[in-house]
Amino acid sequence: MKRIIGFFILLMILQTALPPDAEAAPAYAFRVKFKDKNGTLSFADSLSFLSPKAMQRRNKQGIMLDSSDLPVVQWYIDTAMQTANAVKLHNVSKWFNQIVLITFDSSKVTQLSALPMVASVKLVARYPNGNFKMETSFNKTTEVNPVQNKTTGNSAYYGLSFQQIDLIQSDCLHDLGFLGEGMDIAVFDVNFRYTNTCAAFDSLNADGRIKDTKNFVKDTSFVYSVSIPNDHGMNVLSCMAANQPSVYVGSAPKANYFLYITEDISTEQFIEEDNWLSAAERSDSIGVDLINSSLGYNIFDQPHIPYTYANMDGNTSLIVKAANKAVSKGIFVVQAQGNEGAGAWIYMLTPADGDSVYSVGSVDGSGAWGQSGYGPTYHGVIKPDGVCVGKGVVLIGGNCQTGTTNGSSFASPTMCGAIACLWQAHPELTVWELRDLLRKSSSLYANPNNTLGYGIPDFCKAHQIVLGNTDYTKTENSFVVFPNPINDNFIIRNVTDNTPFHYQVFDASGRRVFQSALIKSWQVESESLKTLSNGTYIMMIVTGSKVQTIQLQKL
């Protein structure tokens, strides 16, 4: 829910003649789903709607064309528009064979529903004053605090972003030259104000790497509105695309970006899911590789019925269906888990519940849970898929300076940029192989939980897995730890060979509390947990070719 404190309305002149009192009358947006595509086109015709880059992405992953790639029948659209006395066709979805139209005459819904080609009609938005294209000012913006000077944990190159980059070891990929170059990332968000002027985006703009822009709410290509003081999209983008060496460097500073506004900050209505769907279909057609979405939904304005936890099943909301469909087209979808963990709702927000979606929760710089939404989904799928820094995260604020804030909204893009760099390094991977790789390289892979999911991915290890240097799978036990439960001292013994190893210890929240040096002995006695509180811990023991996790109880 968003709070409106003032209106500065610019009502666009409708191209269709309206009755004299039309401006004062409410407008309605209806989602009209059709029964079929009437066999008017063949799959060969769908090629005209997909770019060569889109076909290349699909071919590489063995993804075939299907009926969802065929366009909606035009005369179906025309008939629905005429029947509804519609004044605007808001969007068209070939994936789900449906449209959203806007009309001032809600009484036409009965006639619309009775059309032989119509499967269903649903109200997705209501605009009380008919202002479905208004421009509004708000005080809602990301609260960004000045960055406190750090005395440790910094890097001359990354500046203040080093901690969040280093936690997931994505700087390892940068060191190898994988900075996201040639990768196409679509960003679905609210507003990208100052992206075209902030120094942090100088190289992004100078290189022409903003490849496409679209405001799906207002139906315009302009996404840098200064009349809406909301910088959320720009803040999110900075976590990936900012490139100010020694000040702040994002996780994919050389990638290409596609900036799409899908969120209407003035309301919370189902039509925003349709906007998200439209952006996803555009991304597919253009050939985008990854989508970052830092938007999530559960509560809507009246008369829309809010979602319940039972709806977080990966198959209820339109937006989660759209996200899963995008993945089926070969796009890697990275989605913020939401920040509801400490609130009344507590769960993830949709579309983070998508089976195919890689959802990202929030931790602080030490790896401790950052109050992002709990998993699992209602049908038991582990969520989030991974976590990175979202609590105390550093980003570029509305004043074009670095600042700190909180939220999985900013963990998600950091992760997305790192994934883009990993995919750049290994373009042969499919979206499914990439997701599996990320899970296997994560700190809680063998023991995922409902707050951190599979834990913190290690992108350096993920890279090594693909190269065949490391096999981060669940393996047979080679190590024993005794006694267990432990007090102060314990022994780790390799019962199979003398392979050198190292180990890390994580607390119940997934925070790393100890990391050893390389141990070149078959057995070691340790006091590494002596100073820790009593409780449950996970030890991850790593050799050159395998990983083993052991649950420890400290008494």
Image: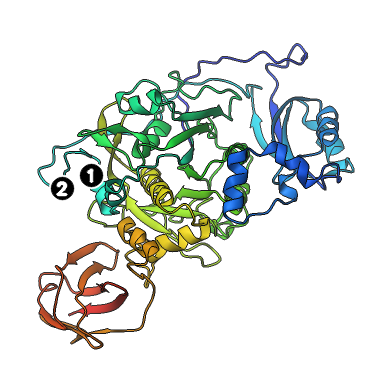
| Residue 75 percent coordinates (x, y) | 85, 33
57 horizontally vs 541: left or right:
right
Report the residue marked by disc 2: 153
* In the image, residue 440 above or below residue 230: below
The residue tagged with tag 1: helix, strand or loop? helix
| Circle 1 Cα neighbour tier, 10 Å, few/some/many (<14 / 14–19 / ≥20) | many
Seen from the viewer's position, the closer of residues 490 and 135 is 490
Which disc is residue 485 wearing?
none
Which residue does the numbered mark 1 point to in the structure image? Answer: 162
Q: Which of 103 and 206 is in front in this view?
A: 206
Disc 2 and disc 1: Cα gap in Å?
Answer: 7 Å
Instruction: Tell me the amino acid under the disc marked 2.
Output: Gly
| Residue 139 seen from this side | yes
User: Which residue corresponds to the image point at 55% horizontal and 37% vertical from the top-left?
Assistant: 268
Mark 2 residue element: loop
Query: Mark 2–mark 1 contact, CB under 8 Å?
Result: yes
Amino acid type assigned to the residue bearing label 1 in the image: Phe
Residue at 49% in and 45% down: 290
